[in-house]
C-alpha cells in the first residue's frame, strides 16, 4: 500500500513539475501611469511633391542604447506651416502613448507629409500596447509590440 501511495505521489509531483515548466514567461506587473523622457525630436520637412493617395505611411520602432525606443512616423500629415513640432510620451491606462504636436503660429490652409521621430527612455523588456497621435485626439496608429534590445520593426498603417 505504501508503495502505491509513493508511486501516486511521485506521479503527481512529475505532473506538477511538467505543468510548471510549460508556462510562458513570468507575468509582469501592469504598467503604471507615468510620464516618460523624450529626446532627439526630429522632423523632416514638408514633402510638397507627394499626393496623399500615393503616400505610404508606416511606423518604425527600433531599440537603442540603454532601454531606449526610437519611434519614427513616416509621412505623418501636419499643417504646411506647423511652427515648432514637439513630442511627448507617457503611460496611461497601461497604454504607451506617443504624441506629436504642432505649435501653429498662424492659420494655414494646407497640409504636408512629414517624417517625425523621437527617442523614448526607460523602456522595459515586455509587451506594450501603443497609440501614436499626430494633430488629433484620435490615434493615427494602434498596435502591440514586444520591446527587447533586438527590436527593429516596421508597421504599416492606413492613410490618415
Image: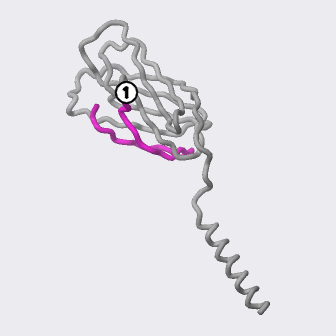
Residue drawn at x 59%, y 36% as measured from the top left: 32
Quadrant of the frame with the N terminus: bottom right
Extreme-top residue of the structure: 106
Residue projecting furthest to the front: 1
- Is 22 rendered above or below residue 47? below
Kindly indicate the quadrant of the structure image that contains residue 115.
Answer: top left
Q: Nearer the viewer, residue 148 or 24?
A: 24
Image side of residue 132 versus residue 9, left or right? left
Is 142 contained in the magenta span? yes
Q: Is residue 15 left or right of residue 47?
A: right
Q: Quadrant of the C terminus?
A: top left
Q: Is residue 25 left or right of residue 7?
A: left
Percent position of residue 72, x then y: 42, 32
The residue sitting at 67% across, 71% down in the picture is 17
Q: Secondary structure at mark 1?
A: strand
In the picture, residue 64 is in which quadrant?
top right
The x, y position of residue 121, in whole percent, is 58, 32
Residue 154 vs 27, above or below: the answer is above
Look at the image and give the residue range highlighted in magenta.
138-160
The stretch drawn in magenta includes residue 150: yes
| Location of mark 1 (residue) | 115
Residue in the image at 52% along x and 33% along y: 92
Amino acid at each position: 500500500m505504501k508503495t502505491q501511495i509513493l508511486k501516486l505521489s511521485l506521479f503527481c509531483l512529475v505532473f506538477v513539475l511538467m505543468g510548471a515548466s510549460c508556462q510562458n514567461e513570468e507575468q509582469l506587473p501592469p504598467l503604471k501611469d507615468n510620464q516618460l523622457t523624450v529626446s532627439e525630436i526630429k522632423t523632416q520637412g514638408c514633402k510638397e511633391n507627394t499626393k496623399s493617395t500615393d503616400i505610404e505611411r508606416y511606423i518604425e520602432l527600433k531599440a537603442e542604447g540603454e532601454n531606449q525606443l526610437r519611434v519614427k512616423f513616416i509621412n505623418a500629415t501636419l499643417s504646411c506651416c506647423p511652427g515648432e513640432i514637439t513630442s511627448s510620451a507617457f503611460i496611461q491606462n497601461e497604454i504607451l502613448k506617443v504624441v506629436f504636436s504642432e505649435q501653429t503660429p498662424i492659420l494655414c490652409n494646407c497640409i504636408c507629409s512629414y517624417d517625425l521621430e523621437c527617442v523614448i527612455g526607460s523602456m522595459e523588456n515586455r509587451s506594450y500596447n501603443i497609440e501614436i497621435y499626430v494633430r488629433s485626439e484620435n490615434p493615427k496608429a494602434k498596435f502591440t509590440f514586444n520591446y527587447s534590445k533586438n527590436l527593429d520593426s516596421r508597421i504599416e498603417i492606413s492613410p490618415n
